[in-house]
Image (cartoon, grey):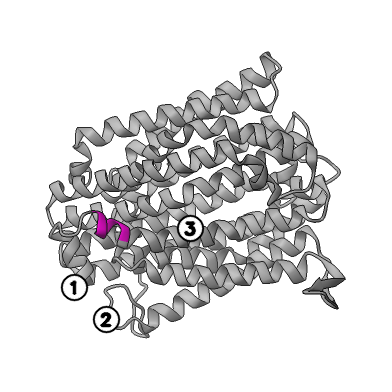
């Protein structure tokens, strides 16, 4: 057992241990997020709102797909962490391999669905005729990367559960470099570039929106291959691959993965399907509102990056401590991660409030979109501290295997508050996108409060014993 895992299950380190796990995960999430941001920002330089909208309209579906894949990864992370805490490395490795089987099946399923219905989906979501073809092209090209992407997500999740957050970070750095480089050569046509006063011809495919999707698919392929190579080389880790590794289904372990993963999948489906409806409602307000909403969401997501790192740390820490039968240490680590998350997002909220325009200008040059987006970022700035509560405590509850409550809370918040409020705001009161975002911050604030109440009950410690 590594010194880090020994420190965790013996309650040593406190803030230092949380930060040791969190900082690679923070950087890791920056790299993951930049894959999406790069598509939005670089397509935005085509100077066409339709190009931005063609990517934006697909994002809720992509979040849904990633959310379901992520649920398999979370299930693997939790069971790996639990078994390492209980000093059962063979069971940890078995959980990892069974999660990989499920991920492979999901990748194949989503590839087939997007190839068959790649045009019908954005059309159903409200894509306008001016960019429908681009939206369909983006989905179909993007789908070719989903099989390696599914595997890499589960592989990296298992490594995090084992206490190794640095390797996934390094893998995602390479993934992001591949995506940005691919975007640069595939989105834009051959052009004259000036660099430090020197002019030269930069070759480019000129594929536009399809080029962004191709670059993302290529980066997913690189990520999957890299994660596989890493796992073959990690000889001293409980999470590893060998030529003798068996991938025969073991239904007792798959049942445990389902116990943890299905509520997480339902939670992600609840959030993503709600986002689908939310985006569809906003699309009725026009291309400018849709583009501003999508870009403001991307800009706001910068605030979540540190907090997601603390959430990942909480999952590993709580999981390993409960595996070692130390619920007291699990609670302490969860509290520390939560406090650090609230501090980081309070700072980020101030940045959104004071400097919204520079954030919007990262993604677009359209002044109308920028002006609308600036007002949205100032609205959502006040919801950052309660957002930290539900982000970090979601990770802590998942580490305990208490994945049903995040699903219940997300169902209530997304559909009972956010979507319902948006429908009334647009259809009944005729409000603009700014009014719709008021409902969003109400949702975020109430969710944060409910998560805190659930955490303080302590009942999460017995979730996997039921």
Find numbered disc 2 in the image and state the secondary structure of the residue it sits on: loop
Q: Quadrant of the C terminus?
A: top left
Q: Are marks 2 and 1 in contact (CB under 8 Å)?
A: no
Number of other residues with Cα within 10 Å of mark 2, as a class: few under 14, some 14 to 19, many 20 or more: few
Sooner in the amino-acid sequence: mark 3 or mark 1: 1
- The residue depicted at 19 percent of the width and 60 percent of the height is 8
Instruction: Estimate the x, y position of residue 214 in percent, counting from the top left.
Output: 70, 66
Please provide percent x and percent y for residue 80: 28, 63
54 w.r.t. 13: above or below: above
Of callouts 2 and 1, which one flags the residue occurring earlier in the amino acid sequence? 1
Instruction: Kindly report the distance in space between the C-alpha atoms of the residues bearing marks 2 and 1.
Output: 9 Å
Q: Residues within 10 Å of mark 3 (few under 14, many from 20)?
A: many
Q: Closer to the camera, 41 or 374?
A: 374
Q: Quadrant of residue 368?
A: top right
Q: Is residue 170 magenta?
A: no
Report the Cα–Cα distance between label 2 and label 3.
Answer: 26 Å
Residue 51 visible (yes or no): yes
**Residue bearing the label numbered 3:** 29
In this figure, which residue is indicated by the disc labeled 2?
236
Query: In the drawing, does residue 454 fall left or right of residue 50?
Result: left
The local secondary structure at tag 1 comes to: loop
Q: Which residue is mark 1?
A: 1
Q: Nearer the viewer, residue 95 or 217?
A: 217
Question: How many numbered discs?
Answer: 3
User: Do the numbered discs 2 and 3 sit on residues whose CB atoms are within 8 Å?
Assistant: no
- Part of the protein shown in magenta: 15-19
């Amino acid at each position: 057992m590594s010194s880090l895992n020994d420190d965790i299950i013996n309650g040593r380190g406190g803030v230092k241990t949380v930060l040791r796990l969190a900082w690679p995960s923070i950087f890791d999430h920056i790299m993951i997020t930049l894959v999406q941001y790069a598509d939005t920002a670089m397509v935005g330089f085509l100077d066409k709102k339709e190009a931005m909208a063609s990517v934006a309209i697909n994002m809720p579906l992509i979040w849904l797909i990633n959310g379901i894949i992520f649920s398999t990864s979370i299930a693997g992370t939790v069971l790996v962490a639990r078994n390492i805490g209980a000093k059962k490395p063979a069971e940890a490795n078995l959980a990892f391999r069974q999660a990989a089987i499920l991920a492979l099946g999901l990748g194949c399923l989503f590839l087939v669905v997007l190839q068959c219905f790649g045009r019908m989906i954005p059309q159903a979501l409200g894509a306008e005729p001016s960019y429908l073809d681009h939206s369909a092209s983006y989905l179909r090209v993007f789908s070719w990367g989903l099989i390696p992407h599914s595997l890499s997500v589960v592989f990296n999740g298992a490594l995090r559960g084992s206490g190794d957050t640095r390797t996934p970070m390094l893998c995602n750095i390479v993934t992001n470099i591949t995506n940005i480089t691919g975007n640069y050569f595939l989105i834009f046509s051959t052009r004259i570039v000036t660099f430090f006063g020197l002019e030269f011809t930069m070759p480019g495919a000129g594929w536009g929106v399809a080029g962004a999707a191709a670059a993302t698919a290529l980066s997913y392929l690189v990520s999957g291959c890299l994660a596989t190579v890493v796992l073959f080389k990690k000889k001293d880790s409980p999470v590893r691959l060998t030529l003798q590794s068996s991938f025969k289904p073991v239904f007792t372990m798959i049942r445990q993965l389902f116990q943890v993963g299905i509520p997480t999948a339902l939670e992600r489906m609840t959030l993503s399907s709600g986002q689908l409806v939310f985006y569809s409602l906003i699309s009725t307000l026009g291309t400018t509102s849709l583009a501003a909403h999508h870009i403001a969401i991307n800009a706001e997501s910068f605030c979540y990056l540190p907090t997601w790192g603390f959430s990942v740390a909480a999952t590993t820490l709580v999981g390993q401590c409960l595996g070692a039968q130390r619920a007291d240490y699990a609670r302490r680590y969860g509290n520390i991660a939560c406090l650090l998350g609230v501090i980081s997002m309070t700072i980020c909220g101030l940045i959104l409030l004071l400097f919204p325009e520079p954030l919007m200008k990262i993604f677009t040059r359209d002044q109308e979109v920028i002006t609308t987006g600036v007002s949205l970022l100032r609205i959502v700035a006040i919801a950052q501290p309660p957002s930290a509560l539900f982000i970090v405590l979601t990770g802590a509850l998942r580490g305990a295997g208490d994945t049903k409550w995040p699903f219940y809370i997300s169902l209530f918040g997304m559909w009972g508050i956010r979507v319902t409020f948006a429908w009334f705001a647009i259809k009944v009161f005729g409000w603009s996108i700014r009014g719709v975002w008021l409902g969003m911050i109400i949702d975020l604030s109430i969710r944060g409060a409910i998560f805190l109440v659930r955490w303080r009950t302590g009942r999460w410690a017995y979730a996997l014993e039921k």
